[in-house]
Image (cartoon, rainbow, N blue to C red):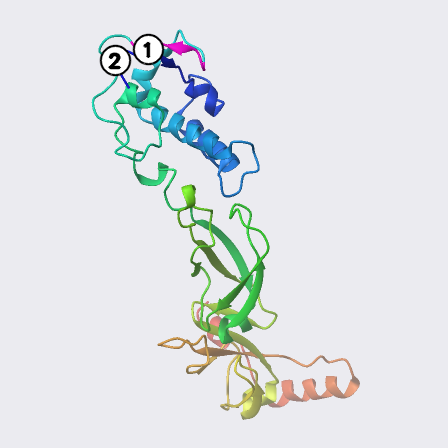
Amino acid sequence: MNRKERMEYKDYYQILGVSKDVSKEELKKAYRKMARKYHPDVSKEANAEEKFKEVAEAYEALKDPEKRAQYDQFGSNYKNGQSFNPPPGWGGQGGGMGGQGNFSNFFENMFGGGGMGGGQDNFYAKGEDVSTKITISLEDAFAGAKKTIRRPAGSEQTGTLNVKVPAGITAGKKIRLSGQGKAGMGGNNPGDLYLEISIAPHAHYRLENKDVYLDLPIAPWEAALGAKVTVPTLAGKINLKIPANAKSGQKMRLKGRGLPSKEAGDQFVVLQIMTPPADTDKATQLYQQMAEELNFNPREALENTL
């Protein structure tokens, strides 16, 4: 096309539905909204493909400050679709879109072609990644599980997903589901979906990184005399030997009984001495007898420092 030939002016601001003083961020939001609306793979709008290319062309012209300034300089007196006669020397050099034919003659004559631009703003680029959080039980974190989840808002896909949760996963880790993010522009690959793991509080256990903690109630005589008790772990019950003269708050380590991994975590059993209530005459007499015969002062060390 001869650069002096008349053509139709394109109002890129009107095409994107923005004002001429639109900010860079608002411009990008408007472009993404319009691109989703007219994407040929999902849009039911009439002439969706033509509209989609028009939106991409408008964004390509306005996202670059130099192109936008050049466009504003020559376009202030024209309306969309109005016959436009380029002034002498107007436009860049070059032969269009390198054979792609994605932009109009108006764009090519104004900017000299030069392609679709690059990076994530390219409307033929891979779709955006989407992130969301899922909460699992401690048992699922320990043993692994298969979960069915709803696709999160923003993925531009509906329905459910089957997710494999690996054994030993810890809070904050992410599971990547390839191709389950936003749809790719122009038929390109979709983005990925990232599921950030959160582990729900447990009624009995608490988790610190890969280590599992369990408060174990024991009777005073079990602490004093020692005992064998049954202790729950995430892998099943075990027998634990409590040493004589055990103290409340004392930790007993069960090696490798925490979350599994190349270096598995441990389970720590924290002893908690529970005092029986003196709610019967017999119980009261036993406590009185202990007070008289044991000669025990639990505050002796503290009193000696005062």
Mark carried by residue 66: none
Q: Is residue 278 left or right of residue 200?
A: right
CB under 8 Å between callouts 1 and 2?
Answer: yes
Would you name the residue on which mark 1 appears?
A: 74
Q: Does the magenta-highlighted stretch encompass residue 41?
A: no
Look at the image and tell me whether residue 299 can be seen. Answer: no
User: In this picture, is 116 found above or below 184?
Assistant: above
Q: Residue furthest front?
A: 1
Q: Where residue 99 sits in the image (x, y, percent)? A: 28, 34
Q: Where residue 227 sits in the image (x, y, percent)? A: 55, 92
- In depth, the one of 281 and 134 nearer the eye is 134
Q: Quadrant of residue 225?
A: bottom right
User: In this picture, is 174 found above or below 302?
Assistant: above
Q: Quadrant of residue 82?
A: top left
Look at the image and tell me whether residue 25 can be seen. Answer: yes
The amino acid beneath tag 1 is Phe
Q: Residue furthest right?
A: 281
Query: Label 2 neighbourhood size at 10 Å, few (<14), some (14-19), many (20+)?
Result: some
Q: What stretch of residues is rendered in magenta?
A: 80-86
Would you name the residue on which mark 2 appears?
A: 90
